[in-house]
């Protein structure tokens, strides 16, 4: 059935989206127009006229207006919602933004000024994502979860362009946009997190005095004012109830609330005016949802879906823009008999009167009940309305009077109709029909239940006594009007309906789609020869009437966002009215019965059938075959399991292969010619081939091998010698490359999902591409299910736009160079005027003007596959094998050329006569043709044909054999052809058609016979050379399945034929009679080989069987592995056996390696596998996963491989790509001139495991587990189960020591300020100290970044990181811009200003675990980053915008990544056994491996530097420096005696030096030729970073955490010192020392004494004999007692540090050591669960086995906290257990359970959370250190839980110890895993150490066994860690006097009164 002629034009929409959304309307165009949303539309209103934006597909719920007042953004709901940015003048889309959101977009807002290109959006997904877009480019700049509760508003601050403010349920957030990251601080109102009022709306104002004001509107009616620093300034009650909307202008502020009031305010919230909209609109309960103040007019939108303008000079007479029904479904619709009016009835309880010309509702009548149906009486004087309650109302037509009310039924009445006799019929939801007589005051006449479902429709028929009823189940029944009884003989009745409302009528079958439900179409209405329908999907459709057959064509019109509930034509036939159920909108459509020009611009989106698939014309077989091609690819084998043992393997073979040429051409639609770029006349023709190559015919052949699968499409750049090719693949790329230089310029791909955002791209493959005429853009079409169309900026690698193409395959796409038919279109061309020409599957040429089809010309018989535009003509080619030349207007054929064999020059043979033409191009007077049969032909004007290239056609290619004495091969394929090729001449010399597909072929030893095996089990034997006609000499058939292999015996007397029937048949070649059968394999035979004597056969089967058989009978022979190794084989093509075990990659099955071939000298084995790879191994291959050389070229599985005569070449065949690749073969040195592409894969194995050892530091760095060092699973102090990273982000402040709420204590220390950090991160980082200028350096330590003036020793700090900082880079163009990367579950890179310490950009969302290396490009705009995982990600960013340019994962750990100093696109990475040379190409990163000679072995690389002229230097693990030219190794220089961890490049006008630093402590300076110029030595240090200043000084960082300045010829100066790797727990402070201010010791085996002013070491570091976790110093600082992990402790005299005293009484580590206040007693607690007391001078025992925490001032009591957190008091020195003393005076307070510090404990944490405390008696302050890395400052005492406090960050691990120093003016804290000392000024010193793993806090439970008192030793307390030691202790000497006491303690402290308090951990 044909398309209906009638068309619709949307004329007006009544309705407005006022419910459930806010700010859904705004003034535009200098306040002369209004834009608003309703249903699925956005509407522009101007002077009563409406224009419509119709590109949305669901409800539009958000709107924003750009500052230009012309551009508008609208967001919709849906499973994949999108944002449309469109122009309100042209009503055209400007940008479509997809991704990041689910369910819907709730709020939108544009930026202003310089940020006007930004747009912020918030979604309805559970995480309420906030997204910042660059809407002009369609890019996501930042994406983050907004809040776990609903977000009501989100806006960009117009006064501070990088700030976003969001608000919602119980929160207000102030976000900062930095790079691609939004960071936030949650603000509160009174310091209590859970008492935040819900905020509903946001506005901004900038006052005249320059202060910025941010307004938020609360649910209580209060408006809050904030500044941009997120501080609340004031709050003002403004409304009685929620303030729903707030709008700011230059005049002030307008607010609207739930109270119905509109109020105007001054900027400081002084009142101006008030309007009550309840009074103005005359309605009660008005709720304002939109307010927009512009000059003297205010635009107001209400929840009741009214939109009006209130004017200042006439407030009580507003101008209504639009009115609609309120929320509730809208179903009732009736047309007035007068043709001027209509009414609608809705669930909102109102009936409304409209006319066709008015802009608003004429009259409304509120009935107070939900209404579902309405109808005019025949005279039009009355309206009958019925509702859901069953009540019927009769109302006057002017809606003034309710005449009657009838209540006859309780069920909803859905249908009302008047019969021809004036009787009222109603149909209800309970299946009843009732009849009423209007003449009898609507008395009910009859009632009857006619069905079990609801009544859907009642239609009149041409018999006035009968009506036709449609039920809810879709049944049609006839009912008598007299008694309302159902007529039983339905099938005999054939009445014609006179009304049409039911879609189930017999003459409307064509309106139904496939598998439609009976309720999918709600209404049908008929006018003339057109029927209109409304369905559940928001569609209004027009069909031709009648349409009794399925599959009727239709026009579809969108606009409604939900189900269309009703439709009606007016009496005049000019209008169609539709109602929307959920959108509450009334649409008026202008009806054009004859179509015509007036309605063209408003035509439907498509003209098609709902039964499209079933009604489609028959498809040509070639087109159908192309549609059904399966482009799925077998995945590469997974990486090997970690359990694979490391074994020693031979080096890869010394021989190499080089791709020489390719036989074959991909039978597809792409063929291009071009000219030499140097202006010569050399002609270049290039075309796609079956493998991953593009071939050029400018003999000799060139090739490009940069792709990795089938190439499907190709296009030529309009202005340059550039080509774009698209391929098959899971993530298929498009390569843009130079056709002469063969260099890749860009690779376009992307299908990555990050945080719900889709970086759009293709999957499965790219079927067609085309350049834009400007050459800057590229369009592509994918093979995914939606055939996605992508528009690219190919140079930048960016997706500019993407959309779904079509559900069916798209064959061609092209740009119109100058700016409906149901046939399938296959090709496109344009003339110089921009007219479009398409070729169709029917062989026609369609001529288009815009999107209108002008005419159709029949051009070919069968599909037209190719069309090409010449300067004054066109060429076409089709399946009929004919090329036609047409006049410019396609009115006549100028010339015709047929592809026939008789026209072929030179004796070549076509595969078939008149092959299907798939590609056409003309150049230089010649025509080039690509055919379906895989041929490239050249035609002249006379029709003479020259064959340029040939290959097998579609179908897999498996059969391959080589001539025994010549460079000739034969191939057979599924394309049913036998082809013979001369490799020397590179041409096909024979072609014979076969009767069946063939998979095997073989020459006999004398090349007189050629045997061919077919897939049906037949074998043909032909004489060779072949005759012109195919006439086999013998035909053999003993099998019915595929013949997989054929081999002749060495003497040629026997022939073995292997089949998939599981047999091998042996034939005598004299008569070809079968002499034997090899039986025994349990699966199909894959390969067969003869031994040299011709007596034995070796077979492989699909069951992985290796079997042997004796010829000629085929008897099976049991042969042992040892015996088999001594057998010499004529050929080796088998894939199984102990001699080829190493060819199999890990985790592969028996089908993954398809073929092998052994060279004639039996040294090299070539393999072909399912992953498109050709590999070379040394034979035999007896070691699993042997090393090999790998070559790419094939696009899918390689099916066969053979060495040619005398091993001159290797020939491989591709399965799906049908290509024959010919490889030169020889020793590696023969191919030094060859491009390095293939050598990039040399020397690989499939496991790539390490075989040599590592330097100890390299091994340690490689094995660091950063996942255990990130904060991902430890308790949050405020939210016990949340992650620390979130906790820390909430607690971060812009500066160290930002103020929080605290008590008003006059002596309480209010804040801390960080002043100095000792040490830097050197043990696992490198190249991380840099000069900013001559006197200023930057480095990092722990979670802090430090800017230090080396002259004044002043430091400043960047503290915005949330975890350990691992790497650093300085911008080469602006040295004050520094980039730093950190550890973390989702680590981030911060780019910050070293002068202002402000964050410039934050990049996140790319890496996991951590960032190990970063670097800026030459221009400073691109940032390179590398992860620290075992398979790290390499990523390149534009850091200023946060845009990711490209990323790729690599297989091994990378230690360093550096840009070339002169480049923005080239960089180098070095790491475990690799050096990669990278190039940024578009959105992809390509790398090449460093190529080394066969005598070298790649080792682990640790550093990189650069010379001139593409020279690269890399430092190897063995201390050598390798020098590279390009990617080739030139030479190796011995640089250091131990590994060289750091290299840097120093470039000046006069010098280009390379600086190296080694583990041997030497800094060496080399010239560009690696001649050493200078060296400097730093004794006893291992160097990790080195760089040079402009003044010639060198900055050196060491593994131990120290920083040195040095110059040649002078001693190094230590400017900073810190601890090395290992945890830092030991800390103590002398109270009266002039020597030093504090001392620390660490797991790094060093003791260090520090001064506070000037900051630095007081003495050189003291080397300890082992790690230390505790120390204690005397008051005067002269003595230092250090406890060691060995169980001993050492006493140092400050005057003689070189001669310490050592004491050892324990075998386990000393955990705590302390001097008593009197300085006479020393207590040492060990892991032997004992405390030893000593005299401090003599070190003789006083008491043993107690752990001291606090001392009393007179040293008579000690307090002990045990690991069970029990408190025990002990008398000293007697050791007697006593009760708690009364009012003791404590010398120190370091316990964490003291009553005075109960408020330090957060809720929900265990007892090990707080590690340490220190109290300042002077200042009334207590500081704590906890497991989260926080230092907290509390008032003392703090009894109340969760006492308010200050929180400080800087530590990157748990804070292990803390103390006051220097008369309590400083605080010192140590970090468990961060090796730095932080020294804050402003009276406080903070010390931070980060090393090693946290210590065991002894949190396991234990059992108290017994207790006793010993008269000789007053008290013995044994703390038990191992329950098994109970028996051992019971047998101790103490057990004879009394049973021992078993307690378990954690730490030790003395009290002032001499008591010991023990607290045990439960």
Image (tube, rainbow, N blue to C red):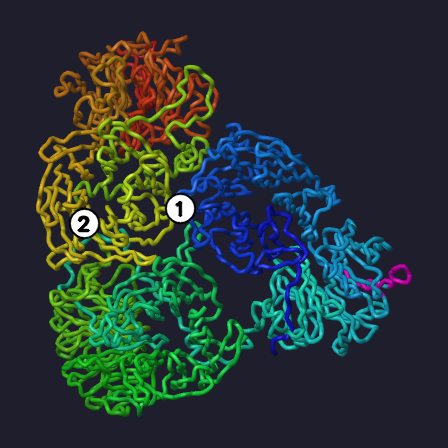
Quadrant in which the C terminus is drawn: top left
Q: Between marks 2 and 1, how big is the CA–CA gap? A: 31 Å
The image quadrant that residue 138 belongs to is: bottom left
Residue lying at 30% horizontally and 83% vertically, measured from the top left:
938
Residue closest to the eye, 615 or 1162 = 615
User: Residue 1371 has which mark?
Assistant: none
Examine the rendered structure and indicate whether residue 800 appears above or below residue 1833: below
* Camera-nearest residue between 1881 and 508: 1881
Magenta stretch: includes residue 1803: no
Residue 464 in the image: state x and y as whole percent.
Answer: 83, 73
Q: Is residue 168 visible?
A: yes
Say above or below: 424 vs 1024.
Answer: above
Q: Secondary structure at mark 1?
A: loop
Horizontal and vertical percent position of residue 639: 29, 56
Residue 180 numbered tag: 1
Q: Is residue 200 above or below residue 345?
A: above
Q: How many marks?
A: 2
Q: Is 432 part of what is drawn in magenta?
A: yes
Highlighted magenta segment, given as a residue range = 423-445
**Residue 1402 appears left or right of 549:** left
The residue beneath circle 2 is: 1506
Provide residue 1037's location: percent of width, then percent of height: 30, 86
């Amino acid at each position: 059935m044909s398309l209906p002629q009638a068309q619709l034009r949307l004329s007006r929409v009544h309705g407005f989206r006022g419910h459930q959304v806010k700010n859904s309307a705004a003034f535009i165009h200098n306040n002369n127009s209004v834009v608003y949303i309703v249903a699925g539309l956005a509407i522009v209103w101007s002077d009563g006229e409406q224009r419509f934006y119709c590109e949305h597909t669901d409800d539009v719920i958000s709107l924003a207006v750009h500052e230009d007042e012309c551009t508008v953004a609208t967001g919709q709901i849906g499973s994949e919602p999108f944002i449309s940015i469109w122009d309100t003048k042209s009503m055209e889309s400007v940008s479509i933004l997809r991704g990041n959101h689910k369910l819907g977009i709730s709020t939108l807002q544009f930026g202003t000024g310089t940020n006007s290109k930004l747009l912020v959006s918030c979604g309805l997904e559970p995480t309420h994502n906030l997204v910042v877009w660059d809407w002009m480019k369609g890019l996501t700049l930042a994406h983050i979860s907004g809040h776990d509760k609903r977000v009501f508003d989100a806006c960009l601050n117009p006064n501070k362009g990088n700030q976003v403010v969001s608000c919602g349920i119980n929160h207000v957030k102030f976000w900062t946009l930095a790079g691609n990251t939004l960071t936030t601080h949650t603000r509160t109102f009174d310091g209590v997190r859970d008492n935040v009022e819900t905020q509903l709306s946001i506005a901004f104002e900038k006052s005249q005095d320059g202060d910025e004001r941010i307004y938020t509107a609360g649910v209580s009616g209060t408006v809050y004012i904030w500044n941009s620093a997120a501080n609340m300034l004031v709050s003002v009650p403004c409304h009685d109830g929620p303030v729903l909307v707030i709008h700011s202008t230059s005049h002030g502020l307008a607010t609207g609330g739930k109270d119905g009031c509109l109020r105007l305010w001054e900027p400081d919230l002084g009142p101006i005016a008030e309007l009550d909209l309840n009074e103005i609109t005359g309605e009660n309960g008005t709720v304002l949802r939109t307010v927009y103040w512009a000059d003297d007019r205010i635009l107001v939108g209400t929840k009741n879906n009214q939109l009006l303008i209130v004017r200042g000079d006439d407030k009580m007479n507003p101008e209504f823009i639009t009115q609609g029904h309120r929320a509730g479904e809208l179903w009732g619709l009736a047309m007035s008999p007068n043709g001027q009016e209509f009414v609608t009835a809705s669930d909102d309880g109102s009936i409304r009167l409209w006319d066709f010309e008015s802009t608003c509702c004429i009259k409304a009548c509120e009935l107070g009940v939900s209404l579902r149906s309405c109808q005019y009486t025949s005279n039009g004087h009355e309206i009958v309305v019925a509702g859901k309650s069953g009540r019927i109302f009769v109302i006057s037509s002017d809606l003034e009077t309710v005449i009657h009310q009838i209540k006859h039924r309780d069920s909803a009445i859905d249908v009302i109709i008047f019969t021809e006799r004036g009787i009222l019929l109603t149909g209800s939801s309970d299946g009843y029909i009732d009849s009423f007589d209007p003449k009898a005051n609507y008395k009910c006449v009859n009632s009857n239940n006619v069905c079990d479902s609801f009544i859907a429709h009642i239609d009149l028929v041409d018999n006035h006594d009968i009506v036709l009823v449609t039920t809810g189940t879709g049944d049609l029944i006839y009912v008598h009007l007299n008694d309302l009884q159902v007529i039983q003989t339905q099938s005999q009745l054939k009445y014609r309906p006179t009304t049409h409302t039911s879609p189930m009528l017999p003459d409307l079958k064509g309106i139904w789609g496939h598998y439609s439900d009976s309720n999918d179409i709600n209404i049908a209405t008929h006018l003339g020869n057109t029927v209109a329908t409304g369905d559940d999907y928001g569609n209004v459709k027009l069909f031709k009437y009648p349409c009794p057959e399925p599959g009727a064509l239709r026009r579809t019109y969108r606009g409604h966002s939900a189900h269309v509930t009703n439709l009606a034509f007016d009496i005049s036939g000019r209008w169609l009215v539709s109602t929307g159920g959920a959108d509450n909108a009334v649409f008026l459509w202008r009806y054009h019965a004859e179509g015509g020009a007036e309605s063209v611009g408003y035509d439907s989106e498509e003209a098609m059938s709902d039964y499209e698939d079933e009604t489609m014309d028959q498809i040509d077989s070639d087109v159908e075959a192309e549609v059904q091609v399966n482009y799925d690819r077998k995945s590469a084998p997974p990486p090997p399991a970690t359990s694979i043992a490391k074994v020693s393997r031979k080096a890869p073979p010394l021989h190499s292969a080089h791709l020489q040429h390719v036989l074959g051409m991909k039978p597809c639609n792409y063929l291009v010619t071009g000219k030499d770029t140097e202006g010569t006349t050399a002609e270049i023709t290039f075309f796609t081939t079956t493998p991953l190559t593009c071939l050029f015919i400018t003999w000799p052949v060139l090739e490009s091998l940069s792709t990795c699968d089938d190439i499907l499409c190709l296009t030529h750049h309009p202005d340059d010698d550039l080509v774009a090719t698209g391929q098959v693949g899971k993530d298929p790329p498009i390569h843009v490359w130079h056709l002469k230089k063969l260099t890749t310029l860009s690779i376009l791909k992307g299908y990555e999902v990050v945080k719900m955002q889709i970086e759009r791209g293709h999957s499965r493959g790219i079927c067609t591409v085309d350049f834009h005429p400007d050459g800057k853009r590229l369009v592509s079409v994918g093979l995914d299910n939606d055939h996605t169309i992508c528009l690219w900026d190919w140079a930048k690698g960016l997706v500019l736009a993407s959309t779904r193409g079509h559900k069916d395959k798209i064959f061609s796409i092209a740009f119109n160079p100058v700016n409906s038919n149901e046939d399938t279109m296959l090709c496109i061309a344009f003339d110089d005027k921009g007219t479009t020409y398409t070729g169709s599957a029917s062989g026609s040429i369609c001529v288009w003007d815009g999107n209108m089809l002008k005419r159709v010309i029949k051009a070919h018989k069968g599909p037209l596959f190719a069309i090409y535009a010449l300067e004054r003509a066109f060429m076409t080619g089709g399946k009929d094998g004919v090329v036609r030349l047409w006049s410019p207007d396609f009115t006549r054929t100028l010339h015709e050329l047929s592809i026939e064999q008789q026209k072929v020059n030179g004796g070549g043979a076509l595969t078939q006569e008149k092959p299907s033409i798939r590609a056409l191009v003309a150049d230089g007077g010649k025509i080039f043709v690509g055919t379906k049969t895989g041929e490239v032909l050249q035609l002249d004007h006379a029709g003479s044909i020259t064959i340029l290239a040939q290959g097998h056609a579609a179908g897999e290619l498996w059969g391959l054999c080589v001539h025994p004495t010549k460079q000739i091969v034969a191939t057979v394929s599924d394309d049913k052809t036998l082809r013979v090729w001369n490799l020397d001449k590179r041409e096909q010399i024979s072609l014979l058609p076969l009767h069946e597909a063939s998979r095997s072929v073989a020459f006999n030893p004398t090349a007189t016979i050629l045997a061919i095996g077919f897939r049906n089990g037949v074998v043909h034997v032909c004489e060779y050379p072949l005759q012109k006609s195919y006439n086999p000499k013998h035909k053999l058939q003993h099998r019915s399945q595929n013949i997989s292999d054929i081999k002749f015996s060495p003497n040629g007397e026997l022939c073995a034929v292997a089949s998939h029937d599981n047999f091998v048949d042996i034939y005598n070649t004299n008569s070809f009679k079968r002499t034997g059968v090899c039986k025994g394999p349990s699966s199909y035979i894959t390969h067969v080989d003869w031994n040299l004597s011709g007596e034995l056969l070796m077979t492989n089967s699909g069951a992985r069987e290796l079997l042997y058989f004796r010829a000629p009978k085929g008897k099976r022979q049991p042969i042992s592995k040892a015996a088999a190794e001594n057998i010499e084989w004529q050929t080796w093509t088998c894939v199984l056996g102990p001699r080829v075990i190493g060819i199999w990659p890990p985790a592969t099955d028996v089908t993954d390696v398809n073929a092998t071939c052994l060279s004639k000298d039996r040294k090299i084995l070539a393999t072909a596998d399912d992953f498109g790879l050709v590999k070379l191994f040394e034979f035999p291959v007896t070691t699993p996963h042997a090393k090999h050389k790998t070559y790419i070229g094939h696009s899918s599985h390689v099916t066969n491989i053979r060495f040619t005569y005398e091993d001159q070449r290797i020939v491989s065949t591709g399965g799906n790509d049908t290509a024959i690749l010919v490889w030169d073969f020889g020793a590696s040195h023969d191919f030094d001139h060859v491009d390095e592409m293939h050598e990039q894969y040399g020397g690989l194995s499939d496991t790539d495991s390490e075989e040599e050892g590592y330097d100890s530091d390299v091994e340690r760095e490689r094995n660091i587990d950063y996942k255990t060092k990130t904060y991902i699973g430890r308790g949050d102090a405020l939210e016990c189960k949340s992650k620390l990273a979130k906790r820390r982000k909430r607690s971060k402040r812009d500066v160290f020591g930002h103020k929080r709420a605290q008590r008003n204590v006059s002596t309480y220390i209010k804040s801390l300020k960080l002043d100095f950090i000792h040490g830097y991160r050197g043990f696992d980082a490198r190249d991380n100290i840099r000069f900013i200028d001559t006197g200023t350096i930057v480095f990092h330590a722990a979670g802090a970044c430090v800017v230090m003036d080396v002259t004044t020793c002043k430091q400043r700090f960047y503290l915005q990181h949330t975890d350990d900082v691992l790497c650093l880079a300085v911008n080469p163009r602006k040295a004050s811009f520094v980039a730093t990367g950190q550890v973390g579950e989702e680590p981030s890179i911060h780019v910050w200003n070293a002068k202002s310490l402000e964050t410039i950009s934050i990049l996140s969302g790319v890496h996991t675990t951590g960032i190990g290396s970063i670097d800026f490009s030459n221009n400073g705009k691109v940032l390179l980053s590398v992860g620290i995982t075992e398979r790290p990600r390499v990523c390149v960013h534009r850091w200023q915008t946060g845009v990711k340019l490209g990323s790729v994962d690599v297989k091994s750990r990378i230690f360093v990544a550096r840009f070339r100093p002169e480049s923005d696109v080239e960089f180098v990475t070095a790491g475990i056994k690799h050096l990669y040379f990278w190039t940024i190409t578009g959105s992809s990163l390509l790398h090449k491996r460093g190529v080394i000679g066969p005598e070298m072995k790649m080792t682990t690389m640790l550093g990189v530097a650069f010379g001139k002229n593409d020279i690269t230097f890399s430092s190897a693990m063995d201390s050598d420096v390798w020098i590279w030219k390009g990617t080739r190794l030139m030479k190796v220089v011995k640089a250091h005696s131990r590994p060289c961890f750091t290299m840097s490049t120093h470039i000046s006008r006069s010098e280009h030096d390379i600086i190296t630093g080694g583990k041997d402590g030497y800094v060496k300076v080399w010239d560009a030729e690696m001649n050493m110029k200078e060296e400097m030595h730093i004794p006893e240090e291992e160097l990790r970073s080195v760089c040079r200043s402009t003044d010639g000084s060198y900055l050196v960082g060491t593994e131990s955490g120290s920083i040195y300045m040095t110059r040649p010829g002078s001693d190094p100066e230590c400017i900073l010192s810190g601890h090395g790797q290992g945890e830092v727990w030991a800390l103590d402070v002398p109270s009266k020392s002039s020597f030093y201010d504090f001392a620390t010791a660490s797991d790094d085996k060093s003791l260090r004494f520090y001064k506070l002013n000037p900051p630095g070491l007081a003495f050189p570091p003291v080397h300890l004999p082992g790690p230390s976790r505790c120390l204690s110093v005397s008051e005067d600082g002269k003595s230092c007692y250090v406890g060691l992990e060995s169980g001993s402790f050492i006493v140092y005299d400050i005057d003689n540090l070189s001669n310490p005293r050592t004491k050892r009484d324990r075998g386990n580590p000393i955990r705590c050591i302390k001097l008593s206040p009197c300085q006479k007693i020393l207590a040492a607690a060990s892991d032997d669960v004992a405390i030893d007391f000593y005299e401090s001078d003599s070190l003789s025992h006083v008491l043993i086995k107690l752990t001291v925490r606090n001392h009393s001032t007179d040293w008579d009591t000690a307090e002990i906290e045990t690991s069970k957190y029990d408190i025990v008091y002990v008398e000293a020195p007697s050791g007697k257990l006593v009760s708690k003393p009364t009012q003791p005076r404590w010398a120190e307070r370091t316990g964490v359970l003291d009553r005075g510090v109960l408020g330090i404990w957060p809720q929900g944490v265990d007892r090990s959370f707080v590690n340490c405390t220190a109290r300042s008696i002077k200042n009334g302050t207590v500081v704590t250190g906890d497991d989260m890395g926080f230092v907290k400052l509390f008032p003392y005492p703090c009894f109340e839980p969760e006492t308010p406090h200050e929180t400080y960050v800087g530590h990157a691990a748990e804070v292990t110890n803390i103390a006051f120093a220097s008369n309590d003016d400083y605080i010192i804290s140590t970090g468990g895993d961060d090796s730095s000392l932080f020294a804050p000024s402003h009276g406080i010193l903070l010390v931070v150490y980060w090393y090693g793993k946290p210590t065991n806090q002894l949190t396991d439970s234990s059992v108290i066994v017994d207790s006793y008192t010993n008269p000789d030793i007053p008290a013995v307390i044994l703390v038990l860690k191992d329950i098994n030691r109970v028996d051992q202790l019971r047998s101790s000497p103490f057990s004879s006097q009394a049973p021992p006491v078993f307690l378990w303690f954690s730490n030790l402290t003395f009290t002032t009164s001499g008591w010991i308090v023990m607290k045990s951990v439960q």
